[in-house]
Image (cartoon, rainbow, N blue to C red):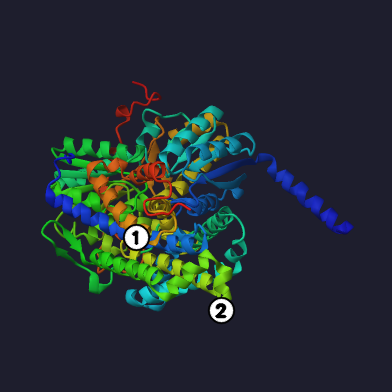
Amino acid sequence: MNFKTIILASATSLLLAGTAMAQTAVKIGVLNDRSGIYADLSGEGSVIAARMAVEDFDAAGKGITVEIVSADHQNKPDVASTIARQWYDQDGVDLIVDVPTSSAAFAVADITREKNKIFMNSGAGSADLTGAKCSPNTVHWTYDTWALAHGTGSAMVAEGNTKWFFITADYAFGQALEKDTTAVVEAAGGEVLGAVRHPFPGTDFSSYLLQAQSSGAQVIGLANAGGDTVNTIKQASEFGITQAGQALAGLLIFITDIHALGLETAQGLVLTEAFYWDLNDETRAWSERFAAENGGAKPTMVHAGVYASVLHYLKAVESTGGKETEALMAAMKATPTSDPLFGEGMIREDGRKVHDMYLFQVKSPAESTGPWDYYNLLATIPAAEAFRPLADGGCALVAN
Amino acid sequence: MFELLGIPPQALFGQLLLGLINGSFYALLSLGLAVIFGLLNIINFSHGAQYMMGAFVAWMLLTYTGINYWWALLIVPIVVGATGIVIERVMISRLYHLDHLYGLLLTFGLALIIQGLFRNQYGVSGLPYSIPAELSGGTNLGFMFLPNYRGWVIIASVVVCFATWFAIEKTRLGAYLRAATENPTLVGAFGINVPRMITLTYGFGVALAALAGVLAAPIYSVNPNMGADLIIVVFAVVVIGGMGSILGAILTGFGLGIVEGLTRVVYPEGSAVVIFVIMAIVLLVKPAGLFGRTQ
């Protein structure tokens, strides 16, 4: 390096230091499954989504430097808490986003509260995150078991499918989903004829399907997720369950699952999601940019939730001019949310983000124009009805 | 509602048949493991990954070249078996003079690498593979609706298992193989190329795994973890049958499939552990396995 470059370099750094006076530096940790069954619906796609939020917000132009780090929690709560602790204590992370798998999400929520940082969840399902186990430091963005049970459950019962049988993954999430959906079905005058709890994860579901078939139920509710759901649906089609007139209700299905199943097998399924890439011009434009970076695969609702939550967080950083946790949480809850993917919405005092949910039906191969063209919109569930009423959650933050 | 004594006979037949179908996969996979262990003394932990490769190569043939299921049944075992031969020549053959544990660690490492590569390329959600048109649909047996494809799986599995057993136990080639495992030096002295025979045996064991993968592709999700989920159960099957026993692997595979199927009706929560409970009992009572010989 000669003398001239040294001069130039120091001049540049002086200039940079000058503008940096008003700068805030925030560090965002994307913590999710990067190798297991949820890697496609969260994984690297969530990192891409977070990066897009930073670009779209033009953080650099507004004097906010954002650094994004990511890690694999392998769907294990112990791994998740170790990483979260290290991020907060040593790496200076201010915000953790995504975190699928409810047990891991609970672990991260506890540590975030202890360290007084912020946790914006997109990937996990348990409605307890903003219910009995709510925290002043948690925002639950995309969906939860209550919303799924009510969306799909009510719609199926309303069509006259009152007799249900559940195929349930035998762990906390599956049982919660079965319980929530049973409540919906029974409240609507329906009846649950039986349930079978299968070990998680499973490979062959034909035995359970046969039991469901002989139960005489009109609907087989699938209270499982990921590969288990894919296999159950695949085998239901093979055993002629749907052709014989029984309907399948997938209670948690992501668009990546439909992609894995193929429309031939998945057609006709009714499901609830918070986001679909083909909803409107804005979601299409965003999803196209996302797909270009994600190997052509369209975003899931989890990816969309990561994008929107990071965007809302950055707005709060801009408006409060700092990153003090109480001020940021207050600002995020006080300001209505607005983004191209979920439209207008708000964050309630229990940390639940509310927006419209959508009831979709999977297209037949003839209706679809190509890969990722999978859903017909059946109904829009308005934000006010989509999520559990504030008073029913049992959250200590909610004033009585 | 499905009490122990309340199972209607019709449902019972249905579940027995389903158990037999799952047993077909256990039998095919444990057969490959038993052949490899019996003749090479290698505990092939990459068997699950090779089963997964079988399903993936079938998918690639269909997607990239349009080669259908029937040709895949022939081509895939050859292709995946060839990769097995390369692995045996390049790596495993260096470990024969060492303890079993080294072979186990090597093949386990290979399994992780293979799964990681596929995961990186294809993600984890799985890929669709349709049932061939000739076998779609099903037959109403009165007590259940049997998809034609599942019927085909049972037949294919029984035929392959019997042919393998026959080849190893009843033919001259099988006699050479068995002799070579007893005393490779002596067999070599008769002018038989023992290392080549061992290599081909490993390739054949891997080809069996790949064949099971092709059979599984239309009914299970084709994803990089599909073998990892299954391999532990298959190892339990091999241990129960007796390490290295060909007939033991086949009969135990089918038998445990049925036991597991019945558990799914009586007490589904326990269906994942029933095989391991049986394994523990068998190990206590007959440590060499049901069909194994104590050496």
- Considering only order in the chain, which callout, 2 or 1, is on the residue closer to the N terminus? 2
| Vertical relation: B65 (above or below) B113 | below
User: Which residue reaches farthest left?
Assistant: B142
| Vertical relation: A4 (above or below) A127 | below
Depth check: A3 or B293 in front? Answer: B293
Chain name for mark 2? B
Q: For the residues carrying marks 1 and 2, which lies nearer the camera in this image?
A: 2
Q: Which residue is mark 2?
A: B191
Q: Give SS at disc 2.
A: loop
Q: Is B290 placed left or right of A150 in the picture?
A: right
**Residue A286's image quarter?**
bottom left
Which label is found at residue A49? Answer: none
Which label is found at residue B250? Answer: 1
The residue shown at (49%, 37%) is A119
Q: Are marks 1 and 2 on the same chain?
A: yes
Question: Mark 1 and mark 2: span between their CA atoms?
Answer: 32 Å
Q: Amino acid at mark 1?
A: Ile
- Position of the C terminus of chain A, as image quadrant, is top left
| Residue B168 image offset from top left, x and y in percent | 41, 69
User: Which residue reaches farthest right?
Assistant: A3
Depth check: B106 or A131 in front? Answer: B106
Callouts 1 and 2 close, C-beta under 8 Å: no
Q: Give SS at disc 1.
A: helix
- Position of the N terminus of chain A, as image quadrant, is bottom right
Chain name for mark 1? B
10 Å crowding of disc 2: few (<14), some (14-19), many (20+): few
| Residue A241 image offset from top left, x and y in percent | 19, 56
